[in-house]
Image (spheres, rainbow, N blue to C red):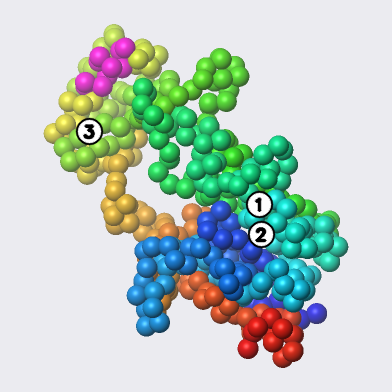
Amino acid sequence: MPAPLPSGRSGPLAGVTVLDVTRVVAGPYCTMILADLGATVIKVENPADPDYTRTFPPMIETEDGQTSAYYAQYNRNKQGISLDLRSEAGKATFLQLARIADIVVENFRPGVMDRFGLGYDVLKAENPRLVYTAISGFGRTGPNASKPGYDNSGQASGGLWSINGYPDQAPVRVGTIIGDLSASLYAAIGTLAALREAERTGLGQIVDISQQDAVLSLTESAVIRNTVAGEVPGPIGNEHPFVSPYGLFPCADGYVFFGGYTDKFWSITCAMFGEPEVARDPRIDTMDKRFDPAVSESVVKPLLERWFATRTKAELEDMAGDKVPLSAIKSIDEVIADPHIAARGMIVDVPVGGQMVRMLGLPITLSGSAVQPHVAAPDLGQDNLAVLQGMLGLDAAALAALGVR
């Protein structure tokens, strides 16, 4: 059997081979995490219908045209091949790859891979230890399994949309693709758990990830507030349902988050602003009293707004230091320039179209793994020869049948 194609990267997943049959974000982000951690990820795209995000802005001007930085962010550190899985030659080649892979990740609607003749049962017969991760809008089981789904479908059907926004106004979607991203994160966790099991037992399994399930899991106390207290949670804006003070407050040049609701933090805050006696005010001298909505609105908020009004975000953060929880509400450009973010390696340089582009890093820091330079996302079919000839040993006739030269 030919040796798996090396990724050129070390890391805890070095030696693990992943077939990535995903597009957009719910899937590519999962496999990007695996690639960042050292796995050899082979992105499989239909040559006539590649990943849509290759055309998503922002675009980078190159000598050959334009390259999507959006695509590059979620597909870095991967190999790339082009296969039409509807064709007999493409199907046969994918089966060959599956025999030597450890993981397959796909994000089609349930049943699509079966129609290709490449469903889990078929792949399992070829490779019993294969981990098969399937990400979809509503999962592989249940009455809605065959429904199409996008990120907004997950936010809507998972309940998150209904609790986001402000009271007495229409709900507001979360300002990022939280359904896609959370499904990818759960997929990565489930995939690694199944891989551990396969390494121990020699048997793979299906990892079934639903965007609706992923979003529902992010709704904090909403479910138990309904099942235990009979509430139907709705939007609450920047407030917390039972903790105060804990939220957004205006200051001289913007807004900050302040969460000093415990007696300890409240006492420190009052002293920090030169009014230690306020902590002993009988109206607000205990946490329970400050939790009362009427007291919070009439006493606590006016105090904080007075203290914060004449100070900038930076001044307030300097005052708070490591004594009380207070953070500036930063714009994205401020976050990118944050020295702490830099120290954590959360903005990384990745080659895109012949230049280096700063993009999101991996929010996983492992003490035993050295930081490595990132590899550019592959062009469509970039690694056809390296994978199909070098890894599978296909001859010229087989390559010609696939349309590869």
Q: Which numbered circle lies on residue 250?
A: 3
Magenta-colored stretch includes residue 299: yes
Amino acid type at mark 3:
Pro
**Which of disc 1 and disc 3 is earlier in sequence?**
1
Residue at image mark 1: 109
For the residue labelled by badge 3, is the local secondary structure a helix, a strand or a loop? Answer: strand
In this rendering, the label closer to the viewer, 2 or 3: 2
Lateral position of residue 116 relative to residue 34, left or right: right
Within 10 angstroms of label 1, few (less than 14), some, or many (20 or more) residues? some
| Residue located 28% across and 52% down the image | 334
Position of residue 313 in the picture relative to residue 197 (left or right):
left
Residue that label 2 marks:
105
- Badge 1 amino acid: Arg
Kindly indicate whether the residue at mark 2 contacts the one at mark 1 (C-beta within 8 angstroms): no
Q: Is residue 195 visible?
A: no
Q: Position of residue 248 (x, y in %)?
A: 30, 32
Q: Which residues are magenta?
A: 294-303
Q: Amino acid at mark 2?
A: Val
- In the image, residue 317 sits, relative to residue 295, either above or below, namely below
The nearer-to-camera label among 3 and 1 is 1
- Residue at 47% over, 30% down: 162
